[in-house]
């Protein structure tokens, strides 16, 4: 029977050893917010790390005391009896460095100035995140993860774990991900960032000091992003060309239901997400490319990996298409790595990795059950 992990609480890890970023910048001290579910076994061999996507955070499963509606973003996947079974695994979820949910980021106070970091917070990469995650693993006493799992940008982090720390991860589950962004995807991110950067309330990233939020820019960025996360079929099935009031108003106000939905999503996102964090996350997406310094040769890039892989894609995901996942599979096979691949038929587009789908969940459950047997 599938149940929830129940009431949980977030934890904060403090790191006093400076972290050097790929850019050369150094963060002298930082904090990471994280949550854990399940029990670490005596051999510390059953730990799983969940890496989040662009707008994700450490609250992966369960809910907080007094806030039953704030359910973790992957609660359908993580918990007792669920595919990532907390009766079998010790699961760690964290808010990445640069985030806006408790980990040190642009909205955090810079101890050297007493003001928010704002625009001075270093541009961050997937490699930087993985380095900070490895330090969290050290603090938790985890020498090797049974698996590192992530969807979208989280899948990129999972892959980078196999490249940066090949001895510290036995399995990588990269879901709805890609070995690097296409030019089209970089273009989408640039338009989203431009919406934020040109918002009069952005103040070059130091809007905190002015007591404002670049709401208009964030709203537009989220609206654009949300369009790319859904498939055309999903939009058609959910909204079609349905009018809010059943007739044309011959105005530029909201008339179609899809317009209302996008405005709602944009407003909701702008109310809680940090604009500088959005810029950082999208840049990390743009920069991820393990083969960049290897003449674009993905085969050479994955030669360092030792982990076993499960790569999952979704048929209607046009932002991270199945073809991009197959590139990963081909590079792994070239290096004679143990890799399984599943292409799931789904109408939900890129968001499919967050949805409860029978075939998808069966693939995840079967693969993770094998990992659980190895941990026993």
Image (spheres, rainbow, N blue to C red):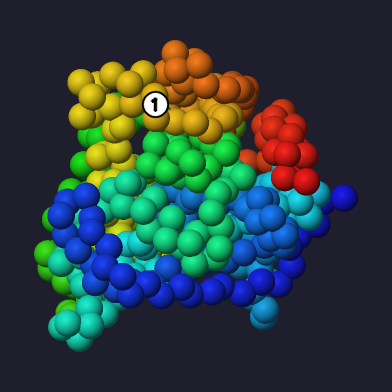
Q: Which residue appears at 55% of the width and 65% of the height?
A: 140
Q: State the image coordinates of residue 249 (x, y, percent, origin top left).
A: 39, 45
Q: Residue 346 vs residue 225: left or right?
A: right
Q: Which residue appears at 16% of the width and 65% of the height?
A: 119
Residue behind mark 1: 302
Label 1 sits on a secondary structure element that is helix
Q: Quadrant of residue 318?
A: top left
Q: Quadrant of residue 368?
A: top right
Q: State the image coordinates of residue 261 (x, y, percent, origin top left).
A: 47, 49
Q: Residue 189 vs residue 39: left or right?
A: left
Of residues 230 and 131, the one drawn nearer to the viewer in this rendering: 131
Residue farthest to the right, as pictured:
1
**Can residue 365 be seen by looking at this rendering?**
no
**Can residue 87 be seen by looking at this rendering?**
yes
Q: Which residue appears at 78% of the width and 46% of the height?
A: 376
Q: Is residue 142 above or below residue 322?
A: below
């Amino acid at each position: 029977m599938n149940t929830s992990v129940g009431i949980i609480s977030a934890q904060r890890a403090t790191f006093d050893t400076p972290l050097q970023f790929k850019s050369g910048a150094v963060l002298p001290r930082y904090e990471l917010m994280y949550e854990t579910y399940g029990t670490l076994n005596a051999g510390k061999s059953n730990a799983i790390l969940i890496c989040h996507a662009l707008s994700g955070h450490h609250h992966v499963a369960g809910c907080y005391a007094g806030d039953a509606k704030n359910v973790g973003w992957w609660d359908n996947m993580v918990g007792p009896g669920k595919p990532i079974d907390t009766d079998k695994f010790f699961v760690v979820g964290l808010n990445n460095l640069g985030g806006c949910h408790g980990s040190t980021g642009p909205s955090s106070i810079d101890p050297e100035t007493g003001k928010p970091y704002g625009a001075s917070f270093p541009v961050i990469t997937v490699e930087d995140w993985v380095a900070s995650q490895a330090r969290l693993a050290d603090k938790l006493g985890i020498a090797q993860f049974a698996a590192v799992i992530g969807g979208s940008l989280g899948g990129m982090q999972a892959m980078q774990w196999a490249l940066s720390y090949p001895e510290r991860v036995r399995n990588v589950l990269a879901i709805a991900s890609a070995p690097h962004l296409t030019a089209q995807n970089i273009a989408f991110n640039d338009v989203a960032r431009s919406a934020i950067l040109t918002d009069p309330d952005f103040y070059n990233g130091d809007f905190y000091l002015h007591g404002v939020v670049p709401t208009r820019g964030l709203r537009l960025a989220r609206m654009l992003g949300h369009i790319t996360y859904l498939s055309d079929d999903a939009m058609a099935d959910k909204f079609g060309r349905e009018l809010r009031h059943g007739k044309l108003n011959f105005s530029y106000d909201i008339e179609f239901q899809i317009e209302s939905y996008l405005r709602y999503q944009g407003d909701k996102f702008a109310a809680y997400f940090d604009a500088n964090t959005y810029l950082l996350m999208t840049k990390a997406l743009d920069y991820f490319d393990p083969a960049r310094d290897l003449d674009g040769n993905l085969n050479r890039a994955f030669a360092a990996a030792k982990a076993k892989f499960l790569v999952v894609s979704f048929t209607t995901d046009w932002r991270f298409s199945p073809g991009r996942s197959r590139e990963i599979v081909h590079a792994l096979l070239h290096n004679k790595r143990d890799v399984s691949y599943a292409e799931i038929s789904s109408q939900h587009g890129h968001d499919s990795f967050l949805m409860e789908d029978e075939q998808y969940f069966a693939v995840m459950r079967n693969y993770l059950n094998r990992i659980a047997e190895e941990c026993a």
